Image: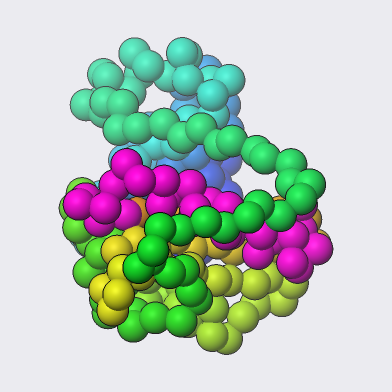
Amino acid sequence: SESFREYGDFFHVRSVFNSEWYNFVVPKLQNPKDLNINEINKLIEVENSRGKKVSFYINKVFVENYRDFLEKYGYKLCGDEIYLLKNLETEEKIRLPDGYGIDNKYDLKKVIKVLEKCFPEWPEENKYSMMYEKYKNNGQQNRLFETMVIQFGNEIIGAGSISLDTDLNLGYLHNAGISEVHRRKGFHTTLVDKRCNFCLEHGVN
């Protein structure tokens, strides 16, 4: 995020990205009737004028209370997020067919081309990948960043990233995809296993 600001009855999360998937009004209140909708509308107008699309991010506990309220103001369900947690115990053996390899050395431009094809609905993949690469190279306190790629000969056919927080003992897998012609061969699972092994190598389980 670029900024995180608290108002009386909601938070505003502002991202370096422009899409509605990253810029949020996050209500604190269980009952939307008590929200200061005028203040929220003014904030959204200002953000829109700056090129930022804003959406509501609703806590799962509140979501049924907010459904009619949001529809009244022209909002609809854009998506929801579910996270799976895996406790890691032992490293997985990495197996790939002949001709394929996995590595953390790559040409970033080639990686971005693959991921842009995997996520055509995400217009800021290039910006996201470049920013992530900066974190990988520069690091952050108590955090490690890595990207793994699967290659077929000299061609990159898939990639997946991971960020580790050693203080939280947590690894977060994200931004992973496989080129369409190479799917259904277990490569995405291989990327998961390789990144989980990376966690264990750094004491995160």
Viewer-nearest residue: 186 or 104: 186
Image colouring:
rainbow
> Mostly what secondary structure, the magenta segment?
helix
- Quadrant in the picture for residue 157: bottom left
Q: Is residue 52 left or right of residue 128?
A: left
Viewer-nearest residue: 53 or 197: 197
Q: Is residue 198 found inside the magenta-colored segment of the image? A: yes
Residue 55 in sight: yes
Query: Residue drawn at (31%, 68%), measured in percent from left and top?
Result: 152
Residue 30's place in the image compared with 57, above or below, is above
Viewer-nearest residue: 175 or 71: 175
Residue 43 in sight: no
Query: Residue drawn at (41%, 46%), measured in percent from left and top?
Result: 186
Viewer-nearest residue: 164 or 197: 197
Q: Position of residue 57 (x, y in %)?
A: 45, 36
Q: Residue pushed farthest bottom?
A: 138
Residue 108's place in the image compared with 163, above or below, is below
Residue 101's place in the image compared with 105, above or below, is above
- Quadrant in the picture for residue 171: bottom right
Magenta residues, start to end = 178-205
Q: Position of residue 122 (x, y in %)?
A: 25, 54
Q: Is residue 65 found inside the magenta-colored segment of the image? A: no
Q: Position of residue 170 (x, y in %)?
A: 71, 54
Query: Residue drawn at (54%, 78%), measured in percent from left and top?
Result: 136
Query: Residue drawn at (50%, 76%), measured in percent from left and top?
Result: 104
Residue 116's place in the image compared with 54, above or below, is below
